[in-house]
Amino acid sequence: MSEYGLVIDGKKVPTEKWLEVKNPATGEVVGECPVATKAQLDEAVTAAARAFRSWSRVPDEERVQAVQHIAGVIEANAGELATLLTREQGKPLKGMGSEFELGGCIAWTSATAALQLPVKVLDDSPRTRVELHRKPVGVVGSITPWNWPLMIAIWHVIPAIRSGNTVVIKPSPYTPLSTLRLVELISEVLPAGVINAVAGKDELGQAMTEHPDIQKIVFTGSCATGRKVMGSAAATLKRLTLELGGNDAGIVLPDVDPAAVAESIVGGAFINNGQTCAALKRLYVHDSIYDEMCDALAAVATRIPMGDGMDEGNLQGPIQNKMQYDKICSMVEEALEMGGKALCGGAPSGGTGYFYPLTIIRDVSEGCRLVDEEQFGPALPVIRYFDIDDAIERANRCENGLGGSIWSRDLAKAAELAGRLECGTAWVNIHGDIRPDVPFGGVKQSGFGVEFAQEGLEEYTSVQIVNIARGEGL
Ligand code: NAD
């Protein structure tokens, strides 16, 4: 029997089937993921629906305290969770790896506890009082990816719970164990049924999107799956937040000192080995500093130690899974065949594990997959441009619109150019700075809805207007 279980109605529930979860650095089995049946999904949704009746009505202060309590529980168990995360996801314990991810979980949970949804008074005249209330929507289904499994789980479930909803979460089959353990810990401090976890293959996610008793789906994953989620959620008109893929462009202006920005650009491109939605995925550099910029990036990237994440000296781990590894191999191969030159990396590391070195490819342009599609891995194409209007146009010629960045010493000009990027977040002189107090979300085919801050919390509510006529003689 697996040491991991589903979490349904406050209890850890075993299953008859399991999936092996393997460490991408070593190939070793980390644990067995329980596979929920359709009946177990129904039980989880029923438990959540039952819990919603009381959880949606408890005094708000109680929910604030519960969420604060959760932050403490995560903090107390951060060491165990970080180790499990490294073993199943591959990311290093140190650097921007698992310990950093757990720190994010705690920060986002605490920040969300402090948010309020006050009643807005829209009219308070002698004859009428009109109030706008924010009401929880019901049972929220959360479907998460494998790149930042715990942080994204927290991004989904904490605002849902904070605003009075109940949750059924389904983690990615590649990285389910740390989420199951996290939910087990959280469920111990909440009334039974407020948070439930099911696990299994992709079809379980589809069953959630079709489930008549789930009122909202919050989904983070690829655009292709996002389209399927939207399609199957249509039959029951579910509320949706879709946080999908990105192909973020960065544009470096000619006034930049390449040595001064190389570290930040490499950090923005290769955070979590490039397996990050809002990583910098295409870099446009002005012709006048192109060679210097390419060399500065390669100098930084080659210094970053990569290996088994359990070894505390490593700051990058393997690619998380075989499918993603094969995709990076073939995208880089194609870019090289089309005339690109690898300044570092450019071929798999070989040996055990899905290791692929940090790769910088110069002399590439649109027309190859590494530039046109989301690579979601450790390979950055550097593209030459001559004219800034042309660079902005090429950056925007993309179906995605998650993030983008402008790099320049002239902050006013950079901010003006940032405003011309078609994306949910446009950064200047930084890329991927995501914060709990700032809304984050995509435009175009990177999805819709935002997460974080007041605007993110409101996504888990619907508006109810209470309109009071103060007529006499009632
Ligand atoms: P994925 O779309 O393959 O899977 C995501 C989740 O959806 C998994 O839990 C999977 O089991 C489930 N799923 C698969 N098919 C489903 C279906 N038909 N119905 C419902 N659920 C289904 O994505 P992934 O490979 O795990 O994650 C990588 C992608 O996620 C990248 O494109 C990345 O950019 C994106 N992402 C976006 C954000 C953001 O905030 N915008 C954050 C992280 C990752």
Image (spheres, grey):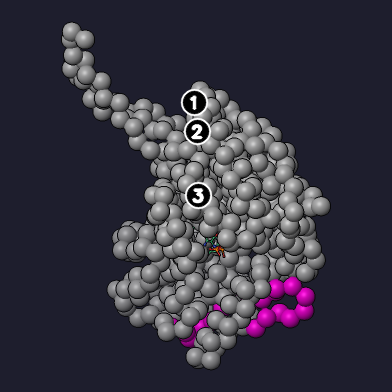
Residues packed near mark 1 inside 10 Å, few (<14), some (14 to 19) or many (20 plus): few
| Quarter placement of the C terminus | top left
State the mark number for residue 164: 2
What secondary structure is marked by label 3? Answer: loop
Distance between the Cα atoms at labels 2 and 3? 20 Å
Q: Measured along the vertical axis of the image, is residue 438 above or below residue 356?
A: above
Circles 2 and 1, Cβ within 8 Å, touching? The answer is yes
Residue drawn at (39%, 64%), measured in percent from left and top? 445
Disc 2: CA contacts within 10 A as few (<14), some (14-19) or many (>=20): many
Predominant SS of the magenta segment:
loop
Q: Which mark is residue 372?
A: none
In which quarter of the view is residue 327 placed?
bottom right
| Rendered-image quarter of ligand 1 | bottom right
Rendered location of residue 60, percent (x, y): 50, 26
Residue that numbered label 3 is attached to: 211
Is mark 1 in CB contact (under 8 Å) with mark 3?
no
Q: Name the side, left or right, on which 464 lies relative to 8.
A: left
Q: Who's the residue at 23% across and 25% down the image?
A: 123
Residue at the far front: name it.
Answer: 39
Q: Give the range drawn in magenta.
A: 347-365
Q: Circle 1 is placed at which residue position?
A: 57
The x and y percentages for residue 458 are 41, 40
